[in-house]
Image: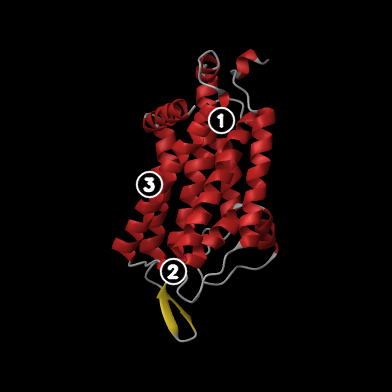
Amino acid sequence: MIAKTVSAAKYALLSFRRNPAATFFTVVFPVMFLVIFGFVFGNENIESDGNTVKVATFIVPGILTLSIVSATFVNLAMGQVFRREFGQLKRLRGTPLSPLAYMIGQILASLVIVVFMTILVTIIGRVFFGVTFNLSSIGVFALSVGIGSMAFSALGLSVTAIIPNQDSAPAFTNAMVFPLYFVSDVFFFSEEESTGFFSKVGDVFPIKPLNESLRDSYNPFIESVSVPWSKWAVVAAWGLFGVLAAAKFFTWTPQTERR
């Protein structure tokens, strides 16, 4: 079981490298946003209680959130639809590889990409914009990344059921997440939380609580980061929904064979 799962993860990483669309939306896209926002807004200052910090400090956690969602939800959804429509998933059902081992392998591969993107975004933020991390909150930060990655991986696998084919996969996935980025404060660069109707909409979905959990670990105005149990609960609940939906609706055969 373990050996087959690891093999599935290696295969998923190899397929990821060979998929230009997945590579762009997962790696290039977040880095592009970080560089653009960092150089345009990053040197502006935010003042609170007599202390001053650069806006870049709050850009980095927002881009980390975007990176996690891209590496898990977007990457898995697009990748599985491509494999399904080209008949790869159907052929896998005829091999000794169990569905569970395959799914876990896909999630492990996504976690590897998340770790890579977390390191990459952190280094870029530090080297180019001088963004520092609150080391005392490393445990909360790591758990936030882990819970978010698992939840969005499950959601990425489940959403494949409503994506009709490989051509529409990029449009479908980005249409789902981009509106949520804006109502989830991913592009709201401040130590304060936004308010209003759209902010309350964001509270219902998993991107905003993940983003807030990560932002607290970078916020220099917070002396001691508390464990965000309520935010983790929202993200985990969506992850559980994703697991149940994937178990019920995930399909292995191309759309043309299901008509």
Question: How far across and how far down the image is residue 69, in percent?
Answer: 52, 46
Viewer-proximal residue, 141 or 252? 141
Using the rendered image of the protein, determine whether residue 167 is visible from the camera's viewpoint.
no
Question: How far across and how far down the image is residue 218, in percent?
Answer: 45, 67
Q: Residue furthest left?
A: 127
Residue beneath the point at 69% across and 29% down: 248
Amino acid carrying mark 3 in the image:
Phe
Amino acid carrying mark 2 in the image:
Ser
In this picture, residue 180 sits left or right of residue 3: right
Query: Which numbered mark, 3 or 2, is in the foreground of this view?
Result: 2
Q: Which secondary structure lies at badge 1? A: loop
Q: How is the image coloured?
A: secondary structure
Residue 168 - label: 1
The residues tagged by marks 1 and 2 sit, at their Cα atoms, a distance apart of 43 Å
Residue assigned mark 3: 116
Crowding at label 1, few (<14), some or many (≥20) Cα neighbours within 10 Å?
few
Residue assigned mark 2: 136
